[in-house]
Amino acid sequence: MLPFTLLACAVAGGVFLIIREPNVEYLFVAGYTIVQYIVLATAWNILGGYTGYVNFGSAAFFALGAYSTVALATFANQLDDLVPESMAPIFHLIFPLSIPTLIVIGGVVSGIVGLGMGYLTLRLRGAFFAIATLAMAVVLQTLVVNWEFVGGSGGAYIVRPGEFPGLGSYMQYLFALMLTLAVLAVVIARAIERSRLGYGFAAIRDDELAAEASGVPTLRLKLIATTISGALMGMAGAPFPYYIGYLQPQSAFGLEYAVNSIAMPMIGGTMNWIGPLVGTLLLGTLQQIANVTISSAVNLLLVGLLLIAFVIVAPNGIVGLVQERLRARRAK
Amino acid sequence: MSAILRVQGLSKRFGGFVALDGIDLEVQPGERLGLIGPNGSGKSTLVNCICGTLQNEAGSVQFDGDVVDGLAAHERTHRGLARSFQLPRPFPSLTLADNLRIPMLYTVHKRTGTPLHANSIEARCSELLQMVGLTGKARHRPRDLTQVEMRKLELARAMAAEPKLLIADESMAGLSHSEIEDILALLVKLNESGITIILIEHIMTAVMSFSQRLAVLVSGKKIADGKPEEVVRDPEVVRAYLGE
Amino acid sequence: MEVSIDLLIGAIVAGLLLGGFYAAVTAGISISFGMLDIVNIAHPGFIILGSYIAYIVNINLGVDPMIVSVVMLPIFYLLGTAIYQIYYLSFEKRGQESLRGLAFFFGVLFVTEVMLLLVFGVDYRYVEAPYIGPSLHFGPIDLPLRMLVPCIAALIMFGALQVFITRTFTGRAVLAVAQDQFALQLMAVDPVRIKRIAFGLSIATASVAGALLVIIQPVEPSVGREYIGRVFAICVLGGLGSMPGTLIAAMLLGVVESITSTFYGPSWAPAIAFGFLLLTLAFRPSGLLGR
């Protein structure tokens, strides 16, 4: 595992330096989005591709991370109003929290919610879990819209500091953080794949009843998958308010998160860690181009149509198609 | 000597349909029990309830001295109860060797406490595949198997869990005469090493030669339980199979 | 907060009217999910589609939305059969319903919503009809016709479906296919054909439900997603595939939502359905009247 981790870090580092070269701010902005989707797609795949349980509420977990950040940032701004005077100095020492800390907190919050929701619905069929995630996304959005503390439907402003010492613009710092998260997500996914846990997930995906009969503690493993998946998504969401500056519920709970978290792994391939990466790079780049040349709505339409097409025609995604080609060639 | 499996008053219904009606059954450690009955008599439902795949509404199941009612299927497997499925349920995306790996990783591993070494898992997989005659297809996926081979895989996977009690549910359907002999020999050998076996079969020659005791299930009720030669001559059993 | 009895009665009545409508919305899912075991999460998308079609014809030709929906019934039916055929060939036959089937329907839901967004934008759309506006008054009870008429229409459609399923051969075959596909085959009835008919029917109900929806409230493309939680909550609570159960569950949800709306504000309504769903799944997954 160590050699791969080092390799992944090296690749990430290389990407960062390459993007940095032309010194075009837009590249960081676009790059951040794509790398963010690598985290989301990989996270989704741990529960969806490895374990076979479809999560339609990726936007909810993502938004939980984002709104944890907003809540904590708002709290930091209003410290003196909210905290008794005697305690104020301590709080001022801790707050405002650094983004890495916020990422961890976002992960914890989303992980716990994932665990809770899983506990209620994972004892039943995968279909019920999927429906529950869909409904949950709507409900969470309702809650956030009604919570004035984080801005309600009007949205919240998060002031991004101008510069990050040593790295240049703050955007570069955010990009570097997201790259680190992506490395983390991919390393975790690959480690799971090759471990005892990964075998358990695969057994559940293939035939849950037979897995139980073989001694696999299916409920526990499903909860683990949901928690890890949710936590990673929350971690991806935590820096989002700083990236976007003005966060409205529609943005955090946006349609694009729901569909892309599913489309990217399913188009790329769900059987291993490479699939989501391939799917994200392909779809992500396509979308960045489409957003600029056509409209963002048409872009989403295309993603939806591609998802339907791939699900019907190439169930194992692009990676699956490639693997089949190789296998056929080897058989000759 | 106390029974390794004790089923008392077990009942199971599906909506209005009574699948099992007050089943009592005892199996002694090391015994070879045959379980027969017409199609639809509830044999597989009984197995499902014993193993925890289904929950029974009434009655109790005790395994190896412990009451297992309410325990999930995987917990019963950990305690040493293993079964093969009547309609084979292999893991389609895994190779045959990996299919056998799952019970080793999750049952045997759990029981011994210490993680199994990768080499010993490999060795054990090869050993099991050889016992059922599937060595050549170790790297294949279940979709490349014939129906008969899939049944052998089912049996091997149940064996991989290193059970104290193994329930073999129609493992021999479709096998040739010599293949049946091989599987029977395998089961006898397992039994000699101390594993209790419940054999559910339609192939009467196999059941008769294998079983030390025979139980008969008809329409959810146990109508006979005793020495094979006697049970087979029981008028009620004859009526159930040949009709009035 | 004082609980005024008048307000409470009003809320309950409104809830019952709403519940009738919810039953019509859920009828399609009762068939596709309850009886055919197909998780068609795209159903609300078709309902919204029905709403928009009713809207266009109503605005341009002045035709009553319910009449539009009845005219559209055969088209929605055919759409349903086509979608089932794709679903069957791609997933059911291959035994891969779970992950891929879900993703497929999600894709359909998503594409429907985005297409409507592209064509109509995010503005709320209303229809016009003579019964939108006036109300009947019986003492303390107000019955806005805008809710009463759809409720009655919904109950009629619901009743018609129930009669079809219990009294006609095809309808009973649908019930049979839910319970024992093999036995049906032995009777020389093609289960796939029956399922196709049933699924077509379920999408046809979306046409009517959509027209009723746009009478009750203004619509915009994302409204569909609010209904996913409601529809499945009602379906599960009512017991999968049980039409009477669906009706009772729909009424129950309608009343609880209405009371919550009246006393705590309307923005909590989606949360109610979800709460129902979670509680039902956690504690009584077989539903109120379930098998």
Image: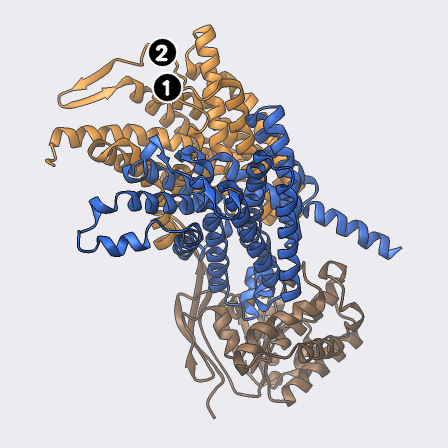
Residue A331, image quadrant: bottom right
Number of callouts in the render? 2
Against A204, is B120 above or below? below
Against B40, is C222 above or below? above
Residue C228 horizontal side relative to residue A36, left or right: left
Kindly indicate whether the residues beneath marks 1 and 2 are on one polypeptide chain: yes
Question: Which of the labelled discs sits on residue C215, or is there none?
Answer: 1
Report the residue at 36% width, 43% height from top. Answer: A70
Report the residue at 89% width, 55% height from top. Answer: A332
User: Which SS class for mark 1?
Assistant: helix
Q: How crowded is mark 1: few (under 14 residues within 10 Å), some or many (20 or more)?
A: many
| Colour used to depict chain C in the structure image | orange
Residue B47's spot in the image, x, y percent? 53, 70
- Mark 1: which amino acid? Ile
Q: From the image, tell me which residue sits under label 2.
A: C129
| Colour used to depict chain B in the structure image | brown
**Closest to the observer: B190 or A107?**
A107
**Closest to the observer: B227 or A304?**
A304
| Colour used to depict chain A in the structure image | blue
The extreme top residue here reads C61
Residue C17, image quadrant: top left
Against B5, is B18 above or below? above
Residue A10's spot in the image, x, y percent? 65, 56
Res. C187 in view: no
Whether tag 1 and tag 2 are in contact, CB under 8 A, the answer is: yes
Res. A240 in view: yes
Residue A43's spot in the image, x, y percent? 54, 51
Q: Residues within 10 Å of mark 2 (few under 14, many from 20)?
A: some
Disc with the residue nearer the chain's start (1 vs 2):
2
User: Which SS class for mark 2?
Assistant: loop
Q: Which chain carries label 1?
A: C
- Mark 2: which amino acid? Ala
